[in-house]
Each structure stands twice: as structure tokens, then as C-alpha cells.
Image: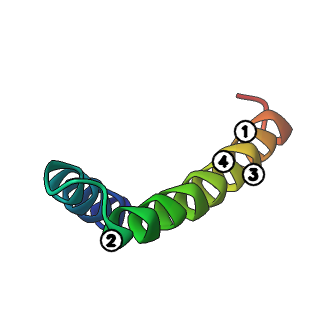
Amino acid sequence: MLKWALIFLILAIISAIFGFGGLAVAFAQIAKILFYIFLVILVIVLILGLSRGW
């Protein structure tokens, strides 16, 4: 999943170079979704880590 995040980051940078057209908006939405997905995964991993006594 991190691979996809890096791919979308690179595509967002490329679309920013071309002037923030409609493509940049789509990549920004994908970046927001990925942010929340990774945030949920972080919380789950932290809860599991604390429950195992790390």
C-alpha cells in the first residue's frame, strides 16, 4: 500500500508542475483517502501493540 502512496505522490507532483488542473484534484482526493486509511492502520497497530505489552 505504501508503494501506491508513493506512486500517487509522484503523480500529484507531476500534475502540480502542469498547473493544478483537474488531475491534481483527483490525486488530492486519493491522497486524503490514503491519509485516513494509514491513520486508521496506525491506531489499530498502536492498540494491538499496547494490548500485547510493548
- Label 4 and label 1: CA atoms lie apart by 11 Å
Q: Which residue is mark 2?
A: 23
Please name whichever residue, 35 or 16, is drawn nearer the observer in this view of the structure: 16
- Which numbered disc flags the more N-terminal residue, 4 or 1? 4
Which of discs 2 and 3 lies nearer the camera? The answer is 2
Judge left or right: residue 37 versus residue 47.
left
Please name whichever residue, 29 or 45, is drawn nearer the observer in this view of the structure: 29
> In the structure shown, which secondary structural element does the residue marked by tag 1 occupy?
helix
Q: Which residue is mark 1?
A: 46
Spot occupied by residue 9 in the image (x, y as percentages of width and height):
29, 54
- Which numbered disc flags the more N-terminal residue, 4 or 3? 4
Q: Which residue is mark 4?
A: 39
Q: Which residue type does callout 2 highlight?
A: Leu
Which of discs 4 and 3 lies nearer the camera? The answer is 4
The residue that appears at 57% across and 51% down in the rendered structure is 35
Judge left or right: residue 39 versus residue 1.
right
- Which numbered disc flags the more N-terminal residue, 1 or 2? 2
CB under 8 Å between callouts 3 and 1?
yes
Spot occupied by residue 2 in the image (x, y as percentages of width and height):
36, 59
- Label 2 and label 3: CA atoms lie apart by 32 Å
